Image: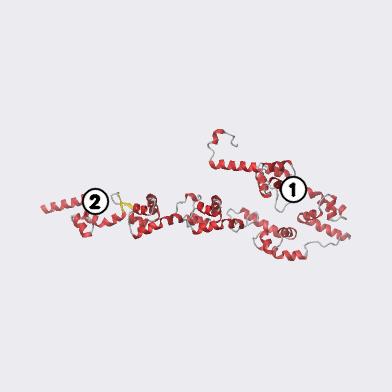
Amino acid sequence: MENKLNLDEIEKLPAKERALLKKRHALHCKYEKAVTLYADTTLSTRIIALRCGVTPGALGNYLRRYWRELVLQRHQIPVESEDLQSIKIYSTGKQNRVSHERYKAAVEACDMMKYIDLNISQVARKFGLNGTALANFMRIHYEEILSRRQKIRERLGINDNIPRGARPSCVQQYTDAVELYRTTEMTIPEIADKFKVSESGLMQHLRFYHKDVLQQKRAMRKRAKEEKYKKRGGLLGNGRKYEPSAQTINKYAEALTLYKNTVLTLKEIADQTGVTTEGFRFYLHKWHKNLVLDHLGITDESQSPKDLRKARNRTKRTSLKYQDAINSIKQNPRSIAQVANEFNLQPESFRQYLHKYEPELISIVGMGQNEQGKRTMCRSEKKYKKAIELYQTTTEDLKSIATRLGLVYNSIGGYIRRNYPDAIILHKKLIQEQKTTYKQ
């Protein structure tokens, strides 16, 4: 059961859902007049769109999505299911219900001996129809009736002797286009543009004289529709290729170049090129995901998380941000806080970055844990390691060890007292044992 209206639930409504509700409300307000005309009149969608100042395509999409019951009612399609979106208005390769009812009686008349003395145009006039429209309808859906009718008229000697079928000039004009459509996945508009022929003319030529090609394409589109994952450049269920339109490519071309060659953020790129941030982000994630993964430092696409916002890999922008500071540390090792201050970086963020992506460097300048569990500077640990080993395993005094190893006595003394108190105990124990031995 659907949730009923409840004022208490309004506060719990997510911001995203609220935004979607407001967006749909604005859409309903925009098309309110057009919906009223569509429901109360028999005007076509094109005329209604012109009167209301909207585009016919947008109005058609809106009606089919939000007012499908009105569209089904206009096309006289009975509603037998609660899921209106599952009811098709136009079925590929099949008759439309309205057209079927319009031409039904005339088609039956063309298949009767009663009207055999009349040609198709004359039969159409009998039923108040356009002759060309009836002939085209029958050529697509009832070709066998036309063929049988012509043979009978020839046998009776009442044929008009008008040649039918494709004209030789049309066959020659569309031969290469038909072959290309048969053997490739190019769309009809693309082929028509390539050969400089009429798109509607090519489509009509295919529907009249190359039904086998259209059936082959429908089977391909059906298989493509069933595929779970779409591949760029592959065929879709509507016959188009799964790729961005030329208009979309041109729109984001400059922004894409900046994204490839710079480390600017999406917002900065959008501001420079005049596109929307969300639109450009969607374009990148849909058609250039490899670039997005590269910016996030993800080399294996199969290992990329479903939500890329949760990816914590090294991005190009972050790498460039810390590159100069890292090179400086490599040339002249010193504390992370000092380097961060020199390069105007946040010390803790810089330290975390080094721990994650520069473990070798952090082993030189960063902090680590010694054997006693104390946090010490890695470079100090390395510097005093030998002195500490000598101090806790021999009876030689620390000042002598420091002089021999070239260390500052006060520094090594303080370091041992702070971080290796056990070494002092061991050293004193060795001295005491030595004194006892001497006494004996």
Front residue of 114/299: it is: 299
Name which residue lies at 61% across and 42% down.
24
- Amino acid at pointer 1: Arg
Name which residue lies at 79% across and 48% down.
102
Q: Position of residue 52 (x, y in %)?
A: 69, 45
Mark 2, other Cα within 10 Å: few <14 / some 14–19 / many ≥20: few
Front residue of 60/345: it is: 345
- Identify whether 344 is placed above or below 163: above
Give the residue at mark 1. 97
Mark 1, other Cα within 10 Å: few <14 / some 14–19 / many ≥20: some
Front residue of 417/49: it is: 49
- Furthest toward the top, the residue is 7
- Is any part of residue 338 visible from this angle? yes
- Identify whether 83 is placed above or below 398: above
Front residue of 412/50: it is: 50
Q: Which mark is residue 414?
A: 2
Select label 2 or label 1 by which is in front: 2
Question: Label 1's element?
Answer: helix
What is the count of numbered marks?
A: 2
For marks 2 and 1, the one nearer the N-term is 1
- Furthest toward the left, the residue is 439
> The N terminus lies in which quarter of the figure?
top right
Q: Is residue 146 left or right of residue 277?
A: right
- Furthest toward the right, the residue is 157
- Amino acid at pointer 2: Gly
Q: CA distance from mark 2 to mark 1?
A: 95 Å
